[in-house]
Amino acid sequence: MKIWIFAEQTEGKLAGVTLELLGKARELALQSAEAEISAVLLGEGVEGLSATLFNYGARRVYLADDARLCLYQHTTYAPVLTALAKKEKPDIFLFGATALGSELAPTVAAQLDTGIAAHCVELRINEDGLLVSVVPAFGGKILGDILCPVHKPQMASIKAGIFPKPEPAPVNGEIVGIDLTLLEGVADGIKALRICREEPKGLPLEEAEVVVCGGWGLGSAENWRLVEELAVLLGGAAACTRPVIDEGWAPGEHIMIGTSGKSVRPKVYLGFGISGATHHVCGMKDTGMIISVNKDEAASIFEVSDYAVAGDLNKILPLLIEKIKENRGIAPK
């Protein structure tokens, strides 16, 4: 079985989800005899990234290092991946469900006349040797098994943070150059010129050991500001659910946790006013310790919590902040 990972990189830096997928590919390989893990790497000046890909599980890297691939464009990346897949015939082709991967993966799938399961939360090999992609449906209330038994490759995209990053093990592998002759006939059309970034403020959710999350039960923008304050006091990051974004209390979707947001694995998660809908829980279920505050004693979030507090967050949240400041000798404003 040939398992391929698209090695997403931007300006010479590998996306974290690439390494997470390599770790998952190693698990899948254990479920199938004679499995072979390869990474496909496109860009300019990126050959040096092959060593990292080998260390995280790839035994072969298909490399296209060319100025025409410096910045991502689906009009150049997709034909290269499609031609390579038609030639080498992988059984499984995995992508990160990033902004880039969410465009590139279905484009390649369409060109290969195969299917793709998007935004998966689990992958496994069944008794028939087929890839089973698990995808949340109906707002995360159920998990559906997606199979592609007829067409190859079997393709899936997975969000960052769903799978843990494996421990590296230095090894050597094989680098195989990709024939780029086909790019000579690709029309320029729209050309990417540069990458412009606006870095979000504060500690990124993915790096935080403590995450303080607020839900619809917060009830106001004032309480959301208390969530942000508590996160700073604990040296962590503030996060939220979809309703908090919709109400305009939180700064943006980059701090939303769930199937349509980010997946996190902090050491501690504190949730305030969160009901515990499946589409949110999918994004934080692998947390070390979960502490939840909700006035509803039957809230679903308590089912996955290590510590459950059935109480009024309007009283608990300010008091908690006050006590932390008091213990640290911080004068009240």
Image: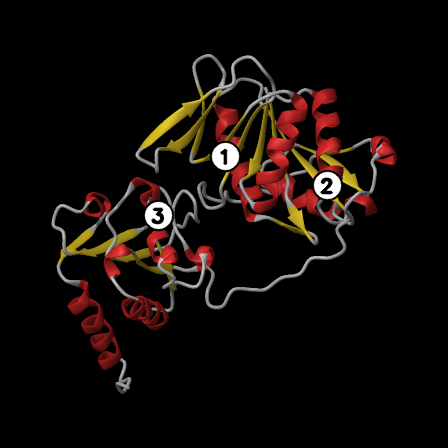
Other residues around mark 1 within 10 Å, as few (<14) / some (14–19) / many (≥20): some
Q: Residue at x 37, y 71 (%)?
A: 232
Residue 24 is marked as 1
Q: Nearer the viewer, mark 1 or mark 3?
A: 3
Secondary structure of the residue carrying numbered label 2: strand
Residue type marked 1: Lys
Give the class, few, some or many, for how many residues have Cα within 10 Å of label 3's Cα (few <14, many ≥20): many
- The vertical placement of 208 against 137, above or below, is below
Q: In the figure, is residue 294 to the left or right of 203?
A: left
Residue 180 x, y percent position in the rendering: 83, 34
For disc 2, the marked residue is: 42
Rendered location of residue 246, percent (x, y): 38, 55
For badge 3, the amino acid type reads Met
Q: Residue at x 76, y 55 (%)?
A: 193
- Which one is nearer the viewer's eye here, 186 or 287? 186
Confirm or deny contact between disc 1 and disc 2 (CB under 8 A). no
Q: Who comes first in sequence, dot 1 or dot 3?
A: 1
Q: Earlier in the sequence, mark 1 or mark 2?
A: 1
Residue located 35% across and 59% down the image? 247
Which structural element holds mark 3?
loop
Instruction: Tell me the amino acid under the disc marked 2.
Output: Leu
The image shows residue 307 at horizontal and vertical percentages of 19, 53
Q: Which mark is residue 284?
A: 3
Q: Is residue 168 left or right of residue 333?
A: right
Element at label 1: helix
Q: Height in image: 198 above or below 4?
A: below
Residue found 44% across the figure and 42% down from its top: 162
Image position of 8 (left or right of 219): right
Q: Residues within 10 Å of mark 2 (few under 14, many from 20)?
A: many
The answer to whether the residues at label 3 and label 2 have Cβ atoms under 8 Å apart is no
